Amino acid sequence: MIRRYDFGHPYDTGAVVRQLPVCEDRVPHFAVAQDGCRVSFSAPLGENDMIFGLGESVRGINKRGHLYRAWNSDDFSHTENKASLYASHNLLLFSGKTGVFGAYFDDPGAVTFDLGYTRGDEAVITSENGDLSVYIIEGDTLIGLVREFRHLIGRSYLPPKWGLGYIQSRWGYASESDLRTVVKEHRERHIPLDTISMDIDYMEEYKDFTWNRETFPDMAGMIADLKADHIRVMPIIDAGVKVAPGDPTYEEGMANDYFCRKENGDVFIGAVWPGRAVFPDFLREDVRRWFGDKYRPLLETGVEAIWNDMNEPAIFYSEEGLAAAYQKADELREKNIAIHDYFALKDAFANMSNSMDDYRRFFHVIDGKPVRHDKVHNLFGAMMTKAGAQGMKAVRPGKRPLIFSRASFIGAHRDGGVWQGDNNAWWGHLLLNLKELAGLNMCGFLYTGADLGGFGCNTTEDLLLRWLQLGVFTPLMRNHAADGTRDQEIYRFRNWEDMRDVLTVRYALIPYLYSELVKAAEKNDMMFRPLAFDYPRDEDACRTEDQLMLGDGCMIAPVYEQNARGRHVYLPEDMLLVRFRSSTDYDLVPMQKGHHWLRLQLNEFPLFIRKGHVIPMAGAAEYVEAIDASALTLLGWLDHGTVITLYDDDGESDVIDFQAGLTVIDVQVKDGVVAARAEGRTVDASRVVLD
Ligand code: MIG
């Protein structure tokens, strides 16, 4: 059951799709305190209570013990001291002795979550503006709370099936020949690949919806050629529009008053990659429709996938911010500066990016009235994604668009996916990738993944290999790296064959992964769950921070440490270890419930299948459309028969006919022999282990 409580004048954020009546009684579970316009909600925490949620955020799966802040931030250093990343997913799930409950804070402004940080025995959630709806979710189990919540916020976005293919990306691919070379190097070595991205370098002077006609003389021809090779091209679109007289996007936006303005009526200008830029007021429906339509020419050249970036929005500096910094410098130039002046001088320049001063400088128009940006900051990226998704659907009606974004708010989970932003080539970020999967799934973001190998810093061949071994399971599987870092395509490395072998497992598992993804969306479920959700009475499972349940039948446990040749793993029940080297080379090891040290050579990675379950694998393929799901090999450990259902469809229709897409695979055990059958498919049960 969900109850809604309103404070101040809540904005319609679009997060919630089912309108609930506003309750007038006291908010359960929390003590509410008002301080000026701020509203705080505090709840006592028992010694062993756990808190889950917050979607894309730093630190643990269990969020207790730190301070988090809902404030979409372009911060390329995801360290433990940070309170914010690119997204605001204000869902908390409390689990303690007396049961579980959830709370969703539907507030587009800044919200802090002090979860046993200031005081170890108290959680305090503070809305800085005090204009919000709070939804209290009651239920018996954590997964039950998630399902209730997801019902409230509506069905998750689903990508086309080929969106589960491997994506190669890099900030720095600057020409047609760069793209063709990368594709060729993959195809020649039979490294599977479905999509290649174009980062900002394809644009003409970083102007949205343009491309450089010298380096990409025949965009449509190039895309058609690559498509013939079963490769899709995925350009980036940035939120900031270059101030460029003569450029249609700029001119149309100016003529129609689509860009955010300052209090004095001037259009707000901030600097991003294109230099001086203006920011579409994505919170307006008409602006979204216009911006979405701007995608059309790119889509008409054959583009089928888009990623939206810089939509927190990131602002490197504004003219006002720059002027203030110069002024500080001028003031200090005249005097013999003291040491604290030096720091003030340095900070005046260093703190210019993404500054609160800038976020207070411009306005949106909501219901005809100006609303200062900082009050609704966290909606900006979500509304840009909505614009893009609408634009893509208009060009290919009835088809699912492939779109993902950096910034997001709950609600955007219906329009597109998210990637986890600018991580680094750090082992710790491999583990963070796993932890964020759990939170993101709770909040409905199912099509997600991190930059494999790490975005910033130079990766290493062992880190990329281990990271691919996690990426095998994430719906969005993309290798991406920052400009200036070491080349990070698989074929650049000495151990590229091991990496390719990892990808063979991905492609063999796509029928299973796609099925689990669609099921999770259809049933408001999570594809990845903390172990605490499945084994709430098992203390060791509840405290596990480096393994996740996958789908109905599996558990993942990646190696995330340098030079490790194995890892500790906790099995909350008997499971079959599949130790993969490739899709055809793996060991099957039945393992008992309990703690284990698992040996894993650099080229080996585990998938655990719960006893009593089976999962299907297809044969090899170098792109998604080549996967033959009519012949499946089953893996599992059984002592009696079981039935599994596999979802499949044409991979692109917008309407999911869930029942029609299900295939029943009937696995029977008789006299020590396993036999399996499924209508319309050949199923090989010879790899199913019997007790
Ligand atoms: O300020 O477009 O997160 O994926 O490569 C950096 C260049 C801007 C940030 C994105 C990253 C992308 C990069 N962008």
Image: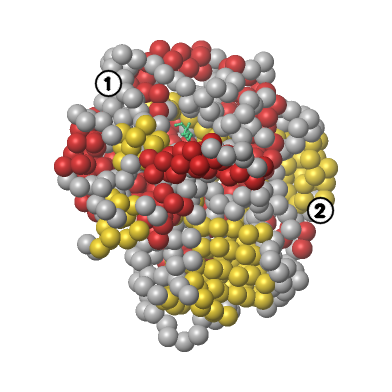
**Left or right, 688 with reference to 294:** right
Q: Amino acid at mark 1?
A: Ala
Dot placed on the residue nearer the N-terminal end, 1 or 2: 1
| Observer-nearest of 414 and 245 | 245
Q: Which is nearer the eye, 605 or 682? A: 605
- The CB of the residue at mark 2 lies under 8 Å from ligand 1: no
On the image, the x and y values in percent for residue 460 come to 67, 24
Q: Nearer the viewer, residue 192 or 476?
A: 476
- Where does residue 361 sit, x and y in percent of width and height? 37, 52
The answer to whether one can see residue 288 in this image is: no
Compared to residue 676, the image places residue 581 above or below, namely above
Q: Residue at x 76, y 32 (%)?
A: 562
Q: Dot 1: what SS?
A: helix
Where does label 2 land, which residue? Answer: 594
Badge 2 local density, few (<14 within 10 Å), some, or many (20+)? Answer: few
Tell me what residue is drawn at x 35 percent, y 66 percent: 11
Residue shown at the point (59%, 66%) measured from the top left: 93
Answer left or right for 316 relative to 76: left
Disc number placed over residue 80 in the picture, else none: none
Residue located at (48% from left, 60% from top): 110
Give x and y (percent) for residue 369: 25, 63
Percent across and percent down for residue 96 are 68, 72
The image's colour scheme reads secondary structure
Q: Residues within 10 Å of mark 1 (few under 14, many from 20)?
A: some
Q: Which residue is mark 1?
A: 220
Amino acid under label 2?
A: Gly
Vertical side of 675 occupied by 273: above or below: above
Q: Which element carries disc 2, helix, strand or loop?
A: strand
